[in-house]
Each structure stands twice: as structure tokens, then as C-alpha cells.
Image (cartoon, helix red, strand yellow):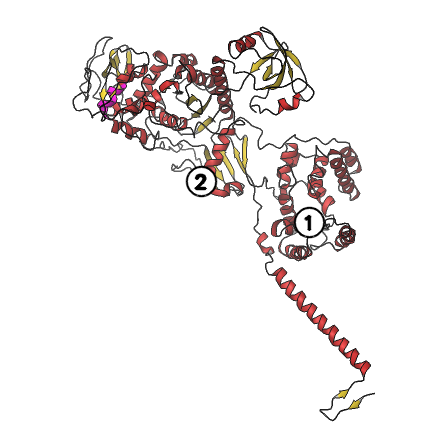
């Protein structure tokens, strides 16, 4: 019953009606509050919603791929290992396999598959009750939104964002673009992002070469690569693959016959993904990576660049083989060092033996245990496979002469004979070294090996080891002299010399053989690597000029102008010293040694080129006229005749001097040996007209190599073995002399002279006639310091005392 009140006409409600009204107001308030809360949550949830439009020009980060000059893939650089494949290059069969596995209605829905989402929500009721992870029910479009724009958190908020972004993606990109992003972005295990990398890593082939069964297996992986690992969970992997093949057949995307054949196919993959099939260039590739980062920054790891390097794979393999062999030969000269481990021969010993790291480059070596041993006979059992056999007699004798014949239970490395069933005894050398080879005119680094084994030590001794070059530095001294008035026929005294230092101490550099040969021409002094004579020559030329030459040639950044430096007391790397020798071969021009020739982005635009020279008419196309002539690169650092004179004198080192064993190459070749004080390092830098190669041998802790381990003994054989392979097929061309050089016979040798400095008549053996040109300190010096020469510096420290160099 309603009563009218006297105030403002308000009605008065009876108690039941009042409670109904109160309840209604409460419900409306709750709805309003809920709506307000939802609005606040939505505002918070979507305040940082990514913009789907960002994907219009999006390209996932892809690996930069490095190639040798002949197109051989040698390495990849990336944070995510991915090979981007445009949609038009993706085989329909591969795309259909992923659609059958992940989203069969992809080309019909608008971003969210309502039926698929409903099925997933129903399953998630049970998953939530059981404490399991929620299922996605996501379309491929939703997965792209999650993988590229969102996190992978399994939350309601993220799923809402995913659905909204999926709708926006469908409005921004077409289906083909979305599928392209998905197939290139998805993580597929085995260090693979995207189908391009997965095809290569799992099966070692391009996606265009995948079989139906292989395509279906890759499509199984988005559900969890570890769940379908091809080796550890092969049965699960095949079952999932076969289910996908069946789905493709049910959808009519493949014929029943093709499906039946694919179901019978075994699942065979590579044991482990590898960055490149070519495995001899690890040191080179790592140096390319370091230089690429310095040039391109972090773009190197995500830009998907094409990088053409200077590497010659055949020369690189020859370099690795020659250096490893040379270091093993040195190691063998210094005896067997003993077993690397010992076990009680009982079940399980094989596992202990296999823990020892073998050099990956020595693929035929195997760990083994000694099962029988006597003074003349040693039998072994190989850890992998259990094969047995005997060590060859010469290796037993080698071990006996060293630490003694290995005893029963000793763990050793062995290598099976190619024929006969026996085994060689092997040990990893303790010594190390480097070899770098480059083209002298362009500076292209053709090969680089920075140590015995990259798998055991990735320290690159060709670019990172700073060592004294010893007598390998002497050509710079003689080149400086030739630039300052001397000639190859100039005579300097090879006799004992003692110099007073600033502190009053005496310094007496000695020749390697402790003998002195008196008056020698510059040629003969360099060929025989005479220390006392070189010091006299450096004293006459002036160490400041020699220092300037070393800096110009890039051997050092700075060098004190002290006489010990003339004998190689300063430190440099094999890479820098080899580049300096290239200037002798190319006519005296500065060489910029480089490993990276060209870098292009994924659109083919060149973003880096090592050759900075201008090429007039190169872009005009060939019209039958004379081809463009491109001037040689590099600044002229010395007179071309000086460079040729040094080259000729260094040929004499091979013909008559300290590197005669290299003459076995049977072609024009020159070079210089070097051995530092106490035999700590052995060097040889040699060259033909086409290749310059530097070799260094030494211990990482800089201890002595041992008595008699000179550049001649330790380094020249490595050079010779490498050059035997590297020069195969190359013409036996002579070193080209400058057109204005004047030639005169001096002591039976045809010497080159700068115009005006040549002798007027030939000089016979035993005679000397100075030229009419400027010849400072050209006279035969008596013992002591010549007039006008710079005052001798303080004697070097003991470690820099270069007496006894060779």
C-alpha cells in the first residue's frame, strides 16, 4: 500500500518493496563497480599494447653467413640461428605440413579460430584442475603475435592481448605475409629458428630438397622440440610426424600413395648441427667474426648479411695440414712425454678414457689403454669399439727413448695404420705456432691457422701473439739502407763489435756460429744473416730511419730507435710481419691485409667493400673497348727498385743462405729465417710472386724450443710443405723488376741498381768497386764506431740480448 507524504510528494514504500529497491541498487552498483574495474584492468592491460603495424616492415633477426672466395660456406654469426626464406621460396608441401599440424583453417579464419579456441578452453578446465599448463588453442596468427610482439607467459591477460593483436595483424598483413613470418620466426630446436635453418641443421639440406616425411617432422617441432627429439625421443618424433602425414592425406593435400611411402621412411638426422661443412677454417672464421664486429657492430649477429671473405679453402686446408704436421715433427724430435692418464683395466675404463679431449682436427686419433707391455712390444685396446692391436716398433722405440715404454693401464692416443692392423702412438704437441698466407698485391688473406688445434685453444697466434721476430726483421734494416744510398753490392765489415751503452756497460752482438767473415756485401750479409754486420749497418743508417720504416710497413706501432731492434728485439705478430714482406714483393706499396672482401645486406645492397679504389667506366658496361685500367692500391712506401733489390736478396737466402731447403719448390722463391735469443721462437717468412706466407713456431709461455731449433729447422719445412700444395697449378713466374732498374754482374750475381748508383763495370769475385752514387758508410769499417754514426744506446736487457740470432 502506497501513501503520499506531505514533503515533496515522495512516496513511502512498505518494507518488502524497500528491500527489493535496495537489492536493485546494490546489483546496479556492483555491475557499475565491476565495469569500472574491468575498464581499469583493460586500460592497464592494453596501455602498452604493441602496434601490429610494426610488422609491415619487420624482418626477424637472421644469421650473417660467411663464404670463402669460391662460395664455400665457412661460418655463421648470429644470436638466433636463422635463415630467412621468402614466402615464394617456401615449398607448398612444407607450408601445408605446418598448417595441418598447427592451424588447418588458417586461410579461412580472421585471426582467431573460435571452434579451436572452444576446444582448447574445454580441455583447459581439466588442465587447471590437474595443475597442468594451459593449452594455447592459438592460430598461427596468434602465435606470430605472441612470438614477435608479446611474451610467452600463459596468462589470461596475455591470451586476451594475443587474440586482439591477431585480429589487428589480419587487418594489417595478408595471409602469405603472416605465414612467412611464422615459418621464419618459430623455434624448432637443434639451434634452429625458422624452417630454413632447421632444414639445414637437422637434415643438411635446403628446404626445397626436403622429403614429405622430413617436412612433416619439422612441422611436429613447434609443439616442443625436446618432446620430439630425433635421437633421444625418436619413437615420439616418428609418431607425431606420421600423425601429421595422415592429417595432410585426410585434407587432400597429399595423395594416399605418397602418404603411405612417407610413413615408411626412417627418421635420419645429422648427429649435431654444424655451422658449416668446411671445418678447416676455425681460426680464420673467428678472426672474421672479431673484425666483423669491429666494423658492423651487433648488426653482424642479426642483419642476415652476405659476407664474402678472402679465404681460399684449398690453401687453408694445406696450411692447417702443414702447420699441424710441422708441430708434430718438432714434438717428435723432443721425445715421448708419457701417458696422459692411467686406469685399472676394469669395466667402465672406457668412459674415463673418452673424457680426454682429442684435437677435433685429428679425426682418426682414438683414446686407448695399454693391455700388454714389454721393452719391445706394446698392445692396446681402443676405448670406442674395443678393437685391439700392437703399436708399431718404431713408436715403441720412440717412447723408450723418451719417458719410457707405456705400461699396462696407461691411457694414450693411437692412430690405426691404413693397412696392417697396427697402431701409431700419438701425443698432442706442447709447442704451438701459426701460419698466415696472403696475396701480396691486394692483401687478400688466403689462409690463416692460429695454432695446432682450435678445439684445444682458440687463441690465434697469427694475429694475437706478440713475439720477437729475430732475424726475420733484418730485411727491414737492409731495405732502409737501400733507401738511403746503399746498394746490394755495398760492403760492410762482419767483425766483432763492442758498443758502450749510456750506463757504461758493454754490448757485443755475436753471430750465430761465433765466426766472422770480414768484408761482406749487403746481399751476402742478409743471405747469411750476420748479426754483427747488421748492427754495423743499422748504426750507419741510423735506427730512427729503421724505426720509421718498421712503422710505415705496419710491423709495429712504435719502436725505440735502439740497435738491438735491428736484430728483431721488438715484438710483432706473424700477421703484421707477413704483410710487411708483401710490400717487398709488390713493388714497395703499402698492403692493407684483409679477410673480409665484401658485405651485402639481405636486399643485396653493398654496405662494405675492402677495395676502395675507383674504377672508371666499370658501371658503364662492356662495349668492346679496352677494359678499365685500375691503379694499384696502397701508398708507395719505398722505391720499387729497393723492393725488388730486397726481393732478389731474399731469393739468395733460399738459393745460398739459411733457407736452402725451400729451393725444393723448384720455382722463384725468397724469404728470411728468424730465431730469437735462447731459441724461444722460430720464424720463416717466404714468398713467391703470387703468395707471401709467414710461419711462427714457439711455446705459449715463451720458453726455449731447445738447442738448434732455428727458423731453418722448425719453420722452413712448414713453409715448404704448405707451398708445395698452395702453388700447384700456379705459373712459375719470375719476380718482375722495375723498368728503370739497372743491372750489373757483381761477384757472379746479376744485381739491380737505381739509375746512377750502378758500378761502371762488372765486379768479379773478390773485388769491390764503389759506385759513383751516394754511399754513406760504404767503406770497410774497422772495429768501432764510424765517424758521424749515432751514439750507441744503453745495452738492452738480458731478455732482449739478441746475440746468437740466426
How crowded pointer 1 is (Cα within 10 Å; few <14, some 14-19, many 20+) is rated as many
Outermost residue toward the right? 1
Q: Residues within 10 Å of mark 2 (few under 14, many from 20)?
A: few
Q: x and y percent of residue 478 in the render?
A: 28, 22
Q: Is residue 103 above or below residue 723?
A: below
**Where does the magenta region start and end?**
534-542
40 relative position to 104: left or right: left
In the displayed structure, would residue 339 be above or below residue 608? Answer: above
Q: State the residue lying farthest toward the top.
A: 376
Disc 1 designates what residue?
Answer: 140
- Look at the picture and state if 154 lies above or below 660: below
Q: Give the image location of residue 635, x and y in percent.
A: 32, 33
Residue 294 in the image, given as x and y percentages of width and height: 45, 39
Instruction: Give the main secondary structure of the magenta stretch.
Output: helix
User: Would you place residue 197 above or below residue 515 in this image?
Assistant: below
Query: Which quadrant: the N terminus?
Result: bottom right
Asked which secondary structure carries label 2, the reply is helix
Q: Quadrant of residue 747?
A: top left
Amino acid at each position: 500500500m502506497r501513501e503520499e507524504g506531505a514533503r515533496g510528494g515522495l512516496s513511502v514504500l512498505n518494507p518488502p518493496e524497500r528491500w527489493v529497491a535496495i537489492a536493485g541498487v546494490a546489483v546496479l552498483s556492483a555491475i557499475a563497480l565491476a565495469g569500472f574495474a574491468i575498464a581499469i584492468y583493460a586500460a592497464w592491460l592494453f596501455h602498452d599494447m604493441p602496434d601490429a603495424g610494426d610488422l609491415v616492415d619487420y624482418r626477424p633477426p637472421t644469421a650473417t653467413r660467411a663464404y670463402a672466395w669460391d662460395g664455400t660456406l665457412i661460418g655463421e654469426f648470429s644470436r638466433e640461428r636463422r635463415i630467412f626464406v621468402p614466402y615464394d621460396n617456401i615449398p607448398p608441401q612444407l607450408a601445408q605440413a605446418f598448417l595441418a599440424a598447427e592451424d588447418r583453417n588458417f586461410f579461412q579464419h580472421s585471426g582467431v579460430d573460435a571452434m579451436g579456441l572452444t576446444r582448447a578452453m574445454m580441455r583447459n578446465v581439466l588442465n587447471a584442475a590437474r595443475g597442468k599448463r594451459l593449452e594455447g588453442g592459438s592460430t598461427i596468427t596468434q602465435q606470430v603475435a605472441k612470438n614477435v610482439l608479446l611474451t610467452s607467459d600463459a596468462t589470461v591477460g596475455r591470451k586476451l592481448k594475443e587474440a586482439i593483436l591477431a585480429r589487428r595483424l589480419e587487418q594489417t598483413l595478408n595471409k602469405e605475409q603472416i605465414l612467412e613470418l611464422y615459418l621464419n620466426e618459430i623455434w624448432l630446436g637443434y639451434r634452429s629458428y625458422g624452417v630454413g635453418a632447421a632444414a639445414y641443421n637437422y637434415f643438411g639440406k635446403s628446404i626445397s630438397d626436403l622429403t614429405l616425411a622430413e617436412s612433416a617432422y619439422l612441422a611436429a617441432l613447434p609443439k616442443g622440440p625436446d618432446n620430439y627429439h630425433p635421437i633421444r625421443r625418436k619413437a615420439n618424433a616418428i609418431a607425431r610426424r606420421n600423425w601429421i602425414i595422415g592429417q595432410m592425406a585426410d585434407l587432400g593435400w597429399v595423395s594416399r600413395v605418397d602418404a603411405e611411402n612417407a610413413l615408411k621412411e626412417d627418421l635420419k638426422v645429422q648427429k649435431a648441427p654444424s655451422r658449416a661443412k668446411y671445418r678447416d677454417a676455425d681460426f680464420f672464421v673467428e678472426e672474421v667474426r672479431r673484425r666483423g664486429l669491429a666494423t658492423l657492430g651487433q648488426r653482424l649477429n642479426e642483419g642476415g648479411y652476405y659476407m664474402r671473405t678472402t679465404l681460399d679453402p684449398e690453401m687453408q686446408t694445406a696450411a692447417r695440414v702443414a702447420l699441424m704436421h710441422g708441430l708434430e715433427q718438432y714434438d717428435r724430435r723432443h721425445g715421448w712425454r708419457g701417458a696422459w692418464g692411467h686406469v685399472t683395466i676394469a669395466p667402465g675404463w672406457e668412459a674415463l678414457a673418452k673424457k680426454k679431449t682429442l684435437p677435433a682436427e685429428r679425426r682418426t686419433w682414438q683414446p686407448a689403454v695399454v693391455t700388454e707391455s714389454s721393452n719391445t712390444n706394446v698392445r692396446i685396446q681402443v676405448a670406442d669399439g674395443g678393437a685391439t692391436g700392437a703399436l708399431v716398433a718404431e713408436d715403441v722405440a720412440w717412447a723408450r727413448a723418451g719417458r719410457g715404454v707405456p705400461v699396462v693401464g696407461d691411457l694414450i692416443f693411437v692412430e690405426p695404420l691404413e693397412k696392417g692392423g697396427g697402431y701409431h702412438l700419438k701425443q698432442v704437441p706442447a709447442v704451438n705456432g701459426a701460419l698466415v698466407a696472403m696475396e701480396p698485391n691486394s692483401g687478400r688473406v688466403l689462409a690463416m691457422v692460429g695454432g695446432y688445434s682450435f678445439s684445444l685453444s682458440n687463441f690465434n697466434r697469427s694475429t694475437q701473439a706478440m713475439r720477437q721476430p729475430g732475424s726475420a726483421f733484418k730485411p727491414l734494416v737492409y731495405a732502409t739502407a737501400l733507401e738511403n744510398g746503399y746498394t746490394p753490392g755495398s760492403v760492410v765489415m762482419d767483425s766483432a763489435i763492442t758498443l758502450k751503452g749510456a750506463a757504461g756497460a758493454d754490448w757485443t752482438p755475436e753471430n750465430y756460429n761465433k765466426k766472422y767473415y770480414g768484408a761482406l756485401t749487403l746481399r751476402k750479409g742478409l743471405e747469411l744473416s750476420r748479426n754483427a754486420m747488421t748492427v754495423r749497418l743499422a748504426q750507419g743508417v741510423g735506427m730512427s730511419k729503421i724505426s720509421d720504416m718498421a712503422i710505415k710497413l705496419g710491423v709495429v706501432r712504435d719502436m725505440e730507435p735502439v740497435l738491438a731492434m735491428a736484430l728483431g728485439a721488438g715484438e710483432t705478430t706473424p700477421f703484421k710481419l707477413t704483410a710487411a714482406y708483401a710490400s717487398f714483393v709488390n713493388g714497395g706499396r703499402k698492403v692493407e691485409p684483409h679477410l673480409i672482401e665484401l658485405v651485402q645486406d639481405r636486399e643485396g645492397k653493398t654496405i662494405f667493400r675492402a677495395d676502395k679504389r675507383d674504377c672508371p667506366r666499370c658501371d658503364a658496361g662492356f662495349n668492346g673497348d679496352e677494359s678499365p685500367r685500375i691503379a694499384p692500391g696502397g701508398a708507395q712506401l719505398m722505391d720499387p727498385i729497393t723492393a725488388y733489390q730486397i726481393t732478389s736478396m731474399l731469393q739468395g737466402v733460399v738459393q745460398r743462405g739459411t733457407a736452402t731447403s725451400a729451393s725444393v719448390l723448384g720455382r722463384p722463391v725468397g724469404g728470411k729465417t728468424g730465431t730469437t735469443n735462447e731459441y724461444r721462437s722460430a720464424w720463416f717468412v717466404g714468398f713467391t710472386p703470387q703468395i707471401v706466407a709467414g710461419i711462427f713456431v714457439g711455446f705459449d709461455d715463451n720458453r726455449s724450443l731447445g738447442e738448434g731449433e732455428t727458423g731453418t729447422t722448425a719453420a722452413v719445412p712448414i713453409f715448404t710443405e704448405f707451398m708445395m700444395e698452395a702453388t700447384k697449378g700456379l705459373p712459375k713466374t719470375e719476380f718482375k723488376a722495375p723498368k728503370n732498374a739497372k743491372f750489373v754482374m757483381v761477384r757472379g750475381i746479376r744485381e739491380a741498381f737505381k739509375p746512377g748508383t750502378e758500378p761502371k763495370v762488372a765486379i768479379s769475385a773478390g773485388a769491390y768497386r764503389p759506385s759513383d752514387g751516394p754511399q754513406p758508410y760504404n767503406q770497410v769499417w774497422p772495429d768501432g764506431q764510424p765517424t758521424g754514426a749515432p751514439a750507441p744506446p744503453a745495452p738492452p736487457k738480458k731478455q732482449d740480448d739478441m746475440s746468437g740470432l740466426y
